[in-house]
Amino acid sequence: MFNQVKLRLEDITSVGVIVLEQLILGITWFLPEPLIAFFTGLAKFLFSLQVTRNPLYNRYLYSGNLQDDKLLKRAEELRKADDFQELCAIYGYKSESHLVQTRDGYLLTVHRINPEQNGFRPNGEIVYFQHGLLMNSEIWVLMANSEENLPFRLCELGYDVYLGNNRGNKYSSRHTSLSVNEDEFWNFSIDEFALYDIPDSLDYVLKLNNMSKLTYIGFSQGCSQVLAAISINNDLNSKIGKLILISPATTPKKLSNWLINSIVHFQPALIYLLFGRKILMKSVLFWRNITYPPFFTKLIDISNDILFDWKSLNIDPIQKFISYFHLYSTTSVKSVVHWFQIIKSKKFQMYQESDLFSAFEYPIHSHIKLSKILLIYGMSDSLVDIKLMIEQLPQFSECKMSVLTAADVNMKPLLTDEDEKLEDTVKASDGTSLNIVGVENYEHLDLIWGENISYYVTGNVTAFLAE
């Protein structure tokens, strides 16, 4: 009885928080610009009272003119960049935009960084990148140091680089017959990413290059999407030569905050009542545009701490200014409801339309037939259950697991014959291999924007591709 009362109290509190945010948004929307400017000035003053160990961050807080500082000027250019092509241009790279029409009528943008157009000799191989939930292709090209952006590094090595975008984000908000103002446009979840977006995008890229195989690199949900896609599209096994999974999260553990966990257990009807059936958290775009940058990054840090217990200590404060302003992109409410169902069921399953019928679980273990997979995860990532992840993947003839620490940064990549092998992993002699790299004290976002990712991620990816 006590637990039931507690659950009802948590549910009421959760609903109250959601309604309060909408109320504050509504009030702020009607505030006059001079008043908003006053609050921005107040935020600047309060943050200027801080003294940190990061001299560049301190210069940002105290500087009257960022144009006088070369590093801060670059950070501001990257933060304010409107789109993928502008980001690439800041680094001196040329990019292309391609339009992919899915079989169900969505028009997706796929970005390309062609080595030949950028002055590098092509090596005849393709690498395809896929972003995570509430993201777009920009997440891959945001590191302040150009050399730390994995797509640029692979382009320099001759790889033809493509970067996909899910339906519903800022680059894929069109349809052949539906308007973004219609509920039906936003009636999609992970199932549609797996059934259409991934296979249709990969087919487009392979056909354009007249190639039969490519390497797929996914981050977070981008990993989940491809695993789901392969498990229900058998021909993808022959089209993906190598698979690289960064911070994969097929079946996340429960979220760290009791308030958020109560929302996870809401019935879908209540979530749709609170958030609607279209875009999830559109208000983030509003707050991003009116909030003083250091304050906005602090809000994101607080949110990530509450939601996932991420401390973000491995991401430089100036890097956060850049990355956090490109972090959010639109998606459907249904996509998040789908994730809530997965968390509750502890199964990587398709969207469950009704409690009367059990959901179909993606047959990853039995239907994926890839020969080489590299998995890189942060060992402090609350969303990655590595033991469950290994159980979900198919059996491999060789499975190597490495652990990277801060002390290893100046060493060579750890994908060597001396790696510690997982117990009882040799199942067959078919030449298949699974390489697992765990990064100690690193979290989810650290593996795309954290310090030393040239070693933790880029070094191991390039070594894996060269095998």
Image (cartoon, rainbow, N blue to C red):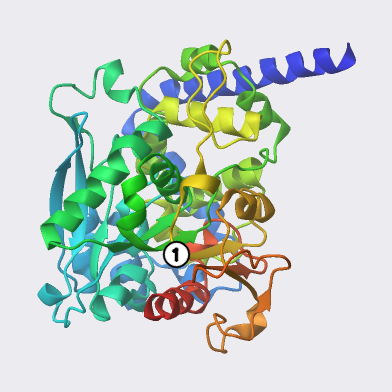
**SS category of the residue bearing label 1:** loop
Quarter in which the C terminus is drawn: bottom left
Furthest-right residue in this view: 2
Residue depicted at 22% across the width and 29% down the height: 104
Q: Position of residue 34 (x, y in %)?
A: 34, 35
Q: Quadrant of residue 193?
A: top left
Q: Is residue 115 above or below residue 21?
A: below
Relative to 188, is 345 on the left or the right? right
Comparing 151 with 403, the one in front is: 403
Give, as a three-letter code, the residue at label 1: Ser
| Residue 76 in view in this figure | yes
Relative to 89, is 389 on the left or the right? right
Comparing 428 with 74, the one in front is: 428
Furthest-front residue in this view: 429
Q: Is residue 35 above or below residue 69?
A: above
Report which residue position mark 1 lands on. Answer: 371
Residue depicted at 48% across the width and 29% down the height: 350
Instruction: State how many labels appear.
Output: 1
Q: Position of residue 291 (x, y in %)?
A: 42, 43
Quarter in which the N terminus is drawn: top right
- Other-residue count near label 1 (Cα within 10 Å), few / some / many at <14 / 14–19 / ≥20: some
Q: Position of residue 459 (x, y in %)?
A: 46, 79
Relative to 449, is 9 on the left or the right? right
Q: Position of residue 264 (x, y in %)?
A: 62, 27
| Residue 31 in view in this figure | no
Residue depicted at 22% across the width and 61% down the height: 212
